[in-house]
Image: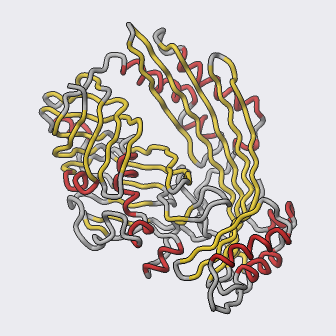
Amino acid sequence: MPPPSSAFFEERFGVSPEDMRKILEIALSKGGEFSELFFEYRVLNSVRMEEDIIKDSSENISLGVGIRVLKGAQTGYGYTDDLSFEKMKQTALTAAAIAAGMSKLSVANLTQKSSNLQVYDLKSPLNEMRLAPKVDLVKEAYEAVKSYDSRIVKAQASLMDEIQYVTIANSEGLLISDVRPQVMMMASATAEDKGVRNTGFKTAGGRYGLGFYQNIMTPKEVGKKAAQDAITLLSAIDPPAGEQPVVLSSYQSGVMIHEAVGHPLEADGNRKKTSIMWDKLGKQVANPIVTIYDDPTIPNYRGSLNIDDEGTIPTKKMLIENGKLVGYLQDRLSAKLMGMELDGHGRRQTYQNNPIPRMGNTVLAPGDATPEDIIKSVKKGFYAETYQGGQVSDTGKFTFSVNMGYMIEDGKLTKPVKNATLIGTNVQILNEVEMIANDTEFFLGTCGKDGQSAAVTAGTPTLKLRQMTVGGRQ
């Protein structure tokens, strides 16, 4: 694949840096304070297997530019998939009219810059592979599901790979580009026995090439884990309901930290005072053993970036340090309005979307305990392992559905549990954290916000909450 450079859009689509500068000037022509171009060329491939056949495969290509104009808190935005100068000019005028004012600012000379980061594995990218070897990977995961146990009645496996070329230019003179790979394999297994039917899932991938599925997690391992969970769930019982000690496992419990803690720390909700955290900066919001940060610079993770979608080079951003709220995740608009530093968390789904503050790789820092220490400390309680989804409100109240958990009895995991929900508020769980282990694992996710999706990762070690409400049928 070509190296990151604005030359990609000039050589392939005829858009020169001089054209970009002229469009930026047109975007400022009605009095805007800042203008920006986001060029994107993206190729997304997928293969899916079900019912013992390759059910479908596809290749989707998108191309376009998003043009943004800022004036105070006003945002003018337009986009087009036609990169002719005349069409981009019309789009720039539309964005300019939405964020108009009395300013008469000029555009700085564009200077090509580059990131000092390289957080992608660019060896053997899947987007450059032919279809046949991708089908072989999917078949390997699918067969691992089917062959695991005779009670597996349905299997599915899929592989997605993507390559995204972006170039960002703005009126301050920034010209910067990135080439971003992304892969994800998914396997699901449905098991049935004596009228009981349950499903297990497993995903694996990140900003890797083929080497991930050869050396880190093979398709066979992906399929086996999905099947293993489905079989375990066949003997699961409904949990005892009520307040009790709860242990959140490493790996998928990251989704709770992402949803219940991460979203309220995105800057837009705090500058608009819709987040429960808007007036808590500098205050103690969690047990002092809790430290949470977001780090898009972790190599190869799904939420990692060399530059964000505004061209800012990301940094590791501390959010809660020793229980104290110390920062919010910023995009350009919120950082300006709040008088805070850019930190590289401005993201957008495609060129058709306005950038907003988003998480990348959100991590609850490890503690000193071991997972065994934590489970031994619980006389009677609940262990949450995998989740089906959840809901979080601006007030911080949340409900998460647990796909699979276990009862904890006399310091040991005993009966598998299903049909459970975890209910609480983010402030409550942050203060109820009593022990944190040293076994951080990361969960791959796709985050939704304001109608936009973004690839993310969330990491947690095993942790214990003193008390939490578990909803169930008993």
Q: Quadrant of residue 282?
A: bottom left
Residue 177, horizontal then vertical, whole percent: 70, 66
Residue at the image point whose x is 32% and y is 26% from the top = 418
Nearest the camera: 160 or 4? Answer: 160
Is residue 373 or residue 296 the one in the foreground? 296
The residue sitting at 47% across, 30% down in the picture is 201
Quarter holding residue 218? top right
The image position of residue 420, as x and y in percent, is 29, 32
Left or right: residue 362 versus residue 432 is right
Q: Residue at x 66, y 42 (%)?
A: 161
Residues 124 and 106: in front is 106
Position of residue 262 relative to residue 248, above or below, is: below
Colour treatment of the image: secondary structure
Quick check: can you spot residue 251? no
Q: Position of residue 220 (x, y in %)?
A: 55, 25
User: In the rendered image, is residue 253 in sight?
Assistant: yes
Q: Residue at x 21, y 41 (%)?
A: 469
In this picture, residue 343 sits left or right of residue 264: right
Looking at the rendered structure, the number of numbered marks drawn on it comes to 0
Q: Is residue 299 above or below residue 127?
A: below
Quadrant where the C terminus sits is top left
At which x and y percent is residue 414?
23, 23
Would residue 240 appear left or right of 62 to someone viewing this image?
left
In the rendered image, the vertical position of residue 301 relative to residue 267, given as above or below: above
